[in-house]
Image (spheres, rainbow, N blue to C red):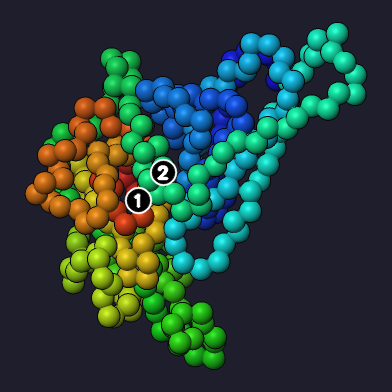
Amino acid sequence: MKPGKTYLLRLINAALNDELFFSIANHTLVTVEADATYVKPFESDIIVLGPGQTSNVLLKTKAEYPNANFLMLARPYFTGMGTFDNSTVAGFLEYKNKPLAAPKNINIPTLKPFLPAINDTSFVANFSSKFLSLNTDKYPAKVPQTVDKSFFFTIGLGTSPCPKNQTCQGPNNSSKFAASMNNISFTLPSIALLQQHFFGQANNGIYTTDFPAMPLMPFNYTGTPPNNTLVGNGTKTVVIPFNTSVQVVLQDTSILGAESHPLHLHGFNFYVVGQGFGNFNPNTDPPKFNLVDPVERNTVGVPSGGWVAIRFLADNPGDIEL
């Protein structure tokens, strides 16, 4: 890069499962966009990107040619169980067009940025709270002010019986880990959901429309885990009428350990109107929602040991997935 210039960097987290910290030594990034939507610009030395999340950031280089090279580092943010690749990926930011009078063969130091601890949930929460919509006449925040349909989905990791003649890595090797929403683990159908819908095959039991709007067996979601960690299995869906304003509260659970859960909504952007730690309180938390300039995204991280609330207008007919 050249000294004294401002560059626009398009950052994409192409990892399958990892949320990533990213930083450039001795340089500050100004976030101006998230998931293809403008945000109120804010500065940060470190940014966080969930799987599939994108962001445009401004990078202003030093006014004069610096006598150093700068490492760009990224590594995972991880709070769950199991093994994962915790290595750090590195690149270099270098300044070009050195002064003609610069000595040859000098030893140019390489500077390294600071990255948070792998499980630094407080940093991630603080960074996430900085995202706000522009909410101008040209770029309004069209967040639904009222809600027609409200859902409360718990998200977590449970166990499912191990198939016969297989060795599983769950408790006692007799079960396997299974992600679930409202204690239901998705069973992949042999025929695509959208194909089933348009060919009227739902009544044949290939999928059902009875996905629960809230947990069937409530418990202390972020407290002491229940004794029964088994989850159900099924191909269950939620049917939402066209132009319905929807609110979804996504609650992390500590059944097999609290962890952050990045979630993407196909076919829609949504507004992140609230988030917090512990169990969502339907009486005291909604009055604190930001209905003025909440950030508009298509992927959000459910905080480890916490919750996030999103709103969107169901105006794109079809089959969608969380």
Residue at the (21%, 46%) spot, across then down = 247
In this orientation, does residue 154 appear?
Answer: yes
Residue at the (19%, 69%) spot, across then down = 219
Q: State the image coordinates of residue 115 (x, y, percent, origin top left).
A: 54, 42
Q: Type of residue at label 2?
A: Val
**Circle 1: is it few (<14), some (14-19), or many (20+) Cα within 10 Å?**
many
Circle 2 sits in a helix, a strand or a loop, which is it? helix
Q: State the image coordinates of residue 214 (x, y, percent, origin top left).
A: 19, 62
Q: Type of residue at label 1?
A: Pro
Circles 2 and 1, Cβ within 8 Å, touching? The answer is yes
- Whether residue 242 is situated above or below residue 142 in the rendered picture: below
Circle 1 sits in a helix, a strand or a loop, which is it? loop
Q: State the image coordinates of residue 59 (x, y, percent, origin top left).
A: 57, 22
Q: For this view, does 24 lie left or right of residue 185?
A: right
In this rendering, the count of numbered labels is: 2
- Seen from this angle, which residue lies furthest right? 104
- Seen from this angle, which residue lies furthest left? 283
Residue at the (79%, 27%) spot, across then down = 108
Q: CA distance from mark 2 to mark 1?
A: 8 Å
- Whether residue 72 is situated above or below residue 222 in the rendered picture: above
Where residue 303 is drawn, which disc sits there?
1
**Circle 2: is it few (<14), some (14-19), or many (20+) Cα within 10 Å?**
many
Where residue 124 is drawn, which disc sits there?
2
Q: Nearer the viewer, residue 102 or 196?
A: 102
